[in-house]
Image (cartoon, rainbow, N blue to C red):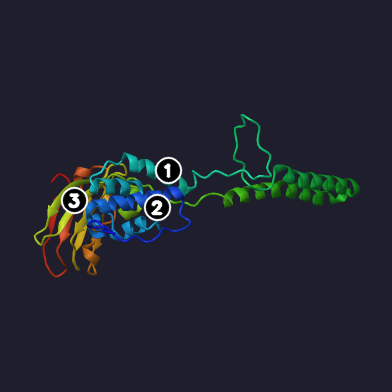
Amino acid sequence: MVYPQGAAHWRGLPQDLPAACSQLVIDLRSLKDRSGLNLTELAKETAISKSSWERYLNGKQFPPRHAVRALCRAAQQTEDELLAQWALADAAWSGRGHTVTPRSDRTSPPTGSIDTAVPDGPPTTQLVRPTRRALLAASALINEHPKSTAAGVFLLCAAMVTPAAVIHASHATTLPPAAHPPVCRLRWCEGRNPHTTACEDPTTMASHTAADGTRLEIRLSPGCQAGWIRAWPTHPGIRIEITGPEAHPQTAVETARPVDNEVATTPMIAAPHPSELRACYYPSIGQPGRECFGGTD
């Protein structure tokens, strides 16, 4: 088989991956291959790390919506069809799209029934019968031994509390695990990695090319009202820092040689007034001086 430039020999997807999620990953792989970009180039184009793309495209982690949109932009493709597929996969991944199939030994509900998906578990009547027996036993005990009223009250309380606890536990165990990156805004975003949040649709506020050729951009998520810096290519010893008048500065330092010149980013900073964000680049610890630019540049 002849692969286009940038195409990869993809590994098999996890067997337990829902069908809608598998189809989304296949579509993302196809779009990435058609773009002609390798993972390193895709990371630079989308400001999403190479390791994140490897997890998304191998079905190990569910891709956030902004990653799907970023890939469409990088490949110069319309996004509507792929975002519709993402919505189906999102529902399947989080469990919202799962419905319980009625068992063959269960009586079919009458036509017009509102709730057709009955979760497996002990029927309500099976919980009521032990409760009734406990109440009768408590009543008999109180009648025969008036001085043992406390024991009867104890049995009554236990009979009332136990079924409720069983029902609560059965519902708690069926809740799907959280499968989405956290959503944040303003101060709640400070210090977070922009690649692990649901801050979608980042835009470039300002850009600058340093004297040593390093490319820097101030990135902003309008929905989260938070910003960060991304820089590439990087080398050991550089430091990038983003500041704002109403937030704590956020800094990233490159201490080891990046793999394939991977994009470096600072943690996020609150940006209620994006035009007041300021980025500074320090070439290395041994070289004095800095290069700064702002959100209005």
Secondary structure at numbered mark 3:
strand
Residue 266 visible within the image: yes
Q: Which mark is residue 62?
A: 2
Q: Residue furthest right?
A: 144
Residue at image position (68%, 42%) is: 106
Q: Residue furthest left?
A: 211
Residue at image position (42%, 50%) is: 21
Give the image location of residue 15, x and y in percent: 47, 58
* The N terminus sits in image quarter: bottom left
Q: Which mark is residue 242?
A: none
Q: Mark 3: give few (<14), some (14-19) or many (20+) Cα within 10 Å.
A: many
Residue closest to the eye, 241 or 17: 17
Residue at image position (49%, 43%) is: 97
Q: Which marked residue is nearer to the observer: mark 2 or mark 3? A: 2
Q: Would you say 75 lies left or right of 24 here? A: left
Q: Which residue is label 3 attached to?
A: 278
Q: Amino acid at mark 1?
A: Leu
Q: Which mark is residue 88?
A: 1
